[in-house]
Image (cartoon, rainbow, N blue to C red):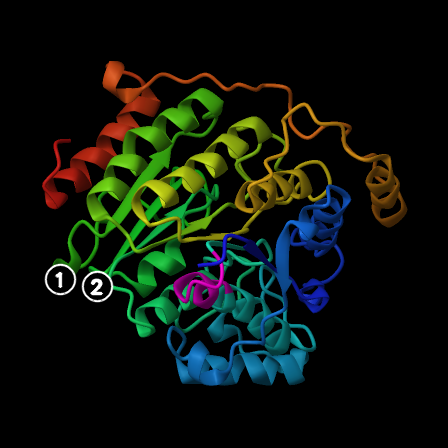
Amino acid sequence: MSGRAQLMWDEAVTGYDFGPGHPMDPVRLALTRSLVGAFGLDREMDVVAAKAAGESTLRLVHREDYIEAVKAASADPGAADQSYGLGTMDDPAFPGMHEVSSLIAGQSVGAAEAVWRGEALHAVNFAGGLHHAMPGGASGFCIYNDASLAIARLLELGAERIAYVDVDVHHGDGVQAAFWDDPRVLTISLHEHPRTLFPQTGWPQETGAESAEGSAVNVALPAGTGDAGWLRAFHAVVPELIADFRPQVLVTQHGADTHFEDPLAHLAVSLDAQRAVQAACHDLAHAHADGRWVALGGGGYAVVDVVPRSWTHLTAIAAGKAVAPETVIPEAWRQEVFAKTRQLAPGRMTDGRWPVEWASWEDGYDPADRLDQAVLAARRAVFPLRGLLA
């Protein structure tokens, strides 16, 4: 197995553009790629542009009629069929939508193939993580569900146990739906509570179909959860489940929209805590999946201040060249940010909260605390189904 990590990148992914004013601004991808380069991380990895996912691959998850609807909307955006979630305010149709969505999906599928075949130990596609797309419809800024397609391709290649961990602020509903009845895939999502955030799913009681009970795990966090609570919840649920499941591959989604500056959600997490969870996922892959790790991006709408820094940390951790939290950002990148966005770029690589402190679940819990109630609900819903103590 190659010791080098792969960075999946094709400049054309920045064509995933819903238009002016839409929160999913593709500048976040371009700026992340530039910051990765500014730190020389692309010299520490194999930068690979995978081919777009073909129709046979897309059909591993998506219905044929939906794929045809995307292609039709891509050719004629004005005629998009809204019954498929296309041409809506969240998912406006645009020319070439099918092609660029397939390309992003292809990067995640290529990452999965490289890791499974031993061509790379870790692979990163920060343009991916479009976890809301359903088998038969677009949703939440997501056209094709690249995370689900990567997992489906791993199953096709012979994987028997795949764990998916989603720390985006929004519930990983599309991935959960794709594998709801498949015990070979363990999906774990930590997200803001569905009472206060789209897509209003991800309740702890959602634990998988009867044929796969305990294969879906949902930690629904109260609005306002900050670093200590977020890390406490992650470590109270994820490591024990991963250790028990023993996945052959770990696929993780790292939406940066948990950050306190994100305009579309209500958690209060810092870049320092995001970096800590990224490092924890890397360590879990090595401890329980022979190091096989596919890391994806996701949401994140503070497109200058947060997203590039968060995903550069993710890329650096995958490359084995972690960037220290106090690192000063190269001035050339800051100038590029201003030239492209007319915004002032941040000066350092995190929010100055390192090391982030949090209390271990093993040290006890408070049943009256809202965060601990959320953790307890998740553990009580799933752990007994997996033969674990709640």
| Residue at the spot of label 2 | 181
Residue type, mark 1 in image: Ser
Secondary structure at badge 1 equals: helix
Could you tell me how far apart the alpha carbons at marks 2 and 1 are, in whole angstroms?
A: 6 Å
Point 12% across, 45% down: residue: 385
Point 59% across, 46% down: residue: 315
Neighbours of disc 1 within 10 Å: few (<14), some (14-19), many (20+):
few
Asked if residue 355 lies left or right of residue 305, the reply is: left
Look at the magenta stretch and give its main secondary structure.
helix
Q: Which residues are magenta?
A: 111-120
355 inside magenta stretch: no
| Residue at the spot of label 1 | 211
Mark 1 and mark 2 in contact (Cβ < 8 Å)? yes
Residue type, mark 2 in image: Asp
Asked if residue 119 lies left or right of residue 377, the reply is: right
113 inside magenta stretch: yes
Q: How many numbered circles does the render carry?
A: 2
- Quarter location, residue 338: top right
Q: Which mark is first along the chain, 1 or 2? A: 2
- Check the image and report above or below for 236 versus 29: above
Q: Is residue 267 visible?
A: no
Point 48% across, 84% down: residue: 55
Q: Residue 311's x, y, as percent?
A: 61, 44
Q: Is residue 183 visible?
A: yes
Point 49% across, 30% down: residue: 276
Asked if residue 188 lies left or right of residue 83, the reply is: left
Q: Residue 71's x, y, as percent?
A: 57, 83
- Check the image and report above or below for 65 versus 22: below
The answer to which of 317 and 257 lies nearer the viewer is: 317
Q: Residue 171's x, y, as percent?
A: 41, 47
